[in-house]
Amino acid sequence: MFSSATESLNLIFDADDTLWDSNIHFLEAFDNFAAAVGDAGLGLSRIEIHAAVRRAEIMLIKSHGYGRRPYIRALHQAADELAPAGHEGLRDEIERIGAHLLERECALLPDVEPTLQELSQRHRL
């Protein structure tokens, strides 16, 4: 069914990196995680740490989607893979990193607000 000119059209956004830049928050969380793994003295390279996080993300995206909470879970799973038992300080650090990630606000990208106002005149957003 086609809509008439008087009907508003629906417009759907994938908000991350379209309306705001949230990727910087994930990058910061990874940097903090990699530093915590380094501080745990496991002798792992940043590439090895990143690969473990990525493996966990790929598995979790199937069941939990992509987002902040699944990313925190991925950090925990990567830590389980990388660190033998007895590294509770690493798990505590992931909780701290996760809490900070969850509380972060994403600022709108430049010109998003006036663009959304204009689009809302003819679309349901």
Image (spheres, rainbow, N blue to C red):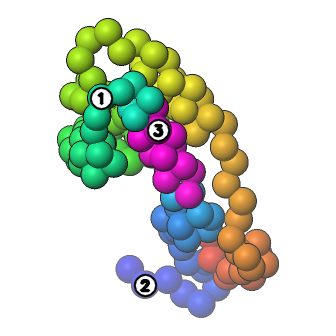
Residue 119 circle label: none
Q: Residues within 10 Å of mark 3 (few under 14, many from 20)?
A: few
Q: First in sequence, mark 3 or 2: give its number.
A: 2
Q: Is residue 2 magenta?
A: no
Q: Which residue is mark 2?
A: 2
Foreground of the two, 68 or 79: 79
**Residue at 39% from the left image edge and 32% from the top image edge:** 37
Q: Quadrant of residue 103?
A: top right
Q: Main secondary structure of the magenta part?
A: helix
Q: Residue at x 27, y 23 (%)?
A: 83
Q: For the residues carrying marks 3 and 2, which lies nearer the camera in this image?
A: 3
CA gap between label 1 and label 3 equals 11 Å
Residue 85 horizontal/vertical position (percent):
26, 11
If the image is split into quadrants, where does the N terminus sit? bottom left
Task: Identify the magenta region.
Answer: 24-36
Among numbered discs 1 and 3, the one appearing first in the sequence: 3
Q: Residue at x 28, y 52 (%)?
A: 47
Question: Is 68 in front, or is 117?
Answer: 68
